[in-house]
Amino acid sequence: MSTQQSSRLSYLGEELKNLETRGLRVHARVLQAQQTPVTRFDGREVINLSSNNYLGLTTHPKLLAAAEKALKHWGAGTAAVRTITGTMSLHLELEEHIARFKHTEAAVVFQSGFTANAGTVSSVLGREDFIVSDELNHASIIDGARLSRATIKVFPHKDVAAAEAILRELKDQPGRKLLITDGVFSMDGDIAPLPELCDVAERYGAIMMVDDAHASGVLGKNGRGTVDHFGLHGRVDIQVGTLSKAIGVLGGYVAGCADLIEFLKLRARPFLFSTSHPPSVTASCQAAFEILEAEPERIERLWENTRYFQQGLAELGLSTGMSETPITPIMVGEGRRAMEFSNVLFDAGVLATGIAYPTVPEGKARLRTIVTATHTRQELSRALEIIGDVARRFALL
Ligand SMILES: *Cc1c(COP(=O)(O)O)cnc(C)c1O
């Protein structure tokens, strides 16, 4: 039995060997302590430059206290999907909180940012519709677009004129059109040209949607995201955010008009067919939103640290690509070289994950770093020193 199974799957072994020869058979580092600026992976204490814990909320005492209280009061899990018996008053309170925070009529929480995107795009559009999508949009948008069966039209990264040309061409098609972009692009750290995209969407009657996973808690007043950052309230129909990155816990949400949210609660498949968040998750997310408003200095420190670190890299002569946010790629080029660079850095005390094909295009491999609000100046300057030393050994400088 087992030999038969393994021979039927032997092509996977071939695939793994193929990845290995390209230096892409990589294993995730194992975190052996909390997700903090200096922590232990694989038995080694390192400066952690690879988490999405922008504001240091994963270990904030108020989140921990909220989780503990909810755990004791409500139990460990919900044992049902939202539409059966998995909606607790706690879930509705968080959704109301998010809607107020985002200045929208309503909001719905999903199990992850991934399911928020995929569930929304696939339920709002159908076979006869069109999705106009930036080429660097997140995988969850791409999967949602495929599941919708709509026709997908991809425009070159941030090329508003190209997006407009596609919409112009589709002008007389009866289907609905969705113009969709990441707010902050996850591998390059650049910001979408959202005001111009809104203009184009309005000109052609397209639905405008933004995935603010990396802008949630990072951009805009108190971390309200790109819509607030650009002053576009009321002009973006569908805003997706994540609770898994700066918010420090797990989940995703959609904020928009009441009809959109009610429709998603009736039709989005992850909402209907996958169990709702444990109470502890929901409660700690709500505590995180309270902290965004009560401790705005965290976001200020995040941006100060970002400026300091990026300036340090520039002074070393390293390219950080198109970054405009705390996501700071250090461009290397070839996939194998990026992975080796990352490994040597790790041995020297800095965790900066190598990212290669297929996550980024071939030849654009990089280290992807993110500084957080809770890194100290000493930690960042030590990291810069180590990065400089290793980059010289790799002849990147
Ligand atoms: C991380 C990310 C997601 C997924 O969010 P999760 O909450 O981790 O599932 C979606 N979109 C973008 C742009 C992301 O970077």
Image (tube, rainbow, N blue to C red):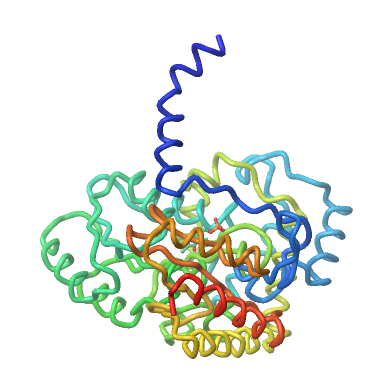
**Relative side of 242 to 212, left or right:** right
Q: Is residue 131 left or right of residue 171?
A: right
Task: Give the image quarter of residue 280.
Answer: bottom right
Front in this rendered view, residue 164 or 308: 308
Q: Residue at x 54, y 42 (%)?
A: 272
Q: Position of residue 279 (x, y in %)?
A: 76, 53
- Residue 107, image quadrant: bottom right
Return the residue nearer the eye: 263 or 117. Answer: 117
**Image location of residue 301, percent across then percent down:** 65, 87
**At 49% from the left edge and 45% from the top edge, which residue is drawn?**
25
Q: Is residue 161 left or right of residue 138?
A: left
Point out the image quarter for the C terminus.
bottom left
Percent coordinates x, y for residue 357 in the rendering = 39, 54
Residue 378 in view of the camera: yes
Question: Relative to residue 9, is residue 304 depicted above or below?
Answer: below
Residue 234: tell me if it is visible. Answer: no
Q: Is residue 282 left or right of residue 185?
A: right
Q: Residue at x 84, y 53 (%)?
A: 71
Q: How many marks?
A: 0
Task: Looking at the picture, tell me which residue is in the foreground, 53 or 33.
Answer: 33
Q: Which quadrant of the figure has residue 90?
A: bottom right
**Vertical position of residue 61 compared to residue 220: above or below:** above
State which quarter of the image contains the N terminus: top right
Compared to residue 116, the image places residue 201 above or below, namely below
Q: Return the x and y of residue 332 as percentages of the image width and height.
A: 41, 69
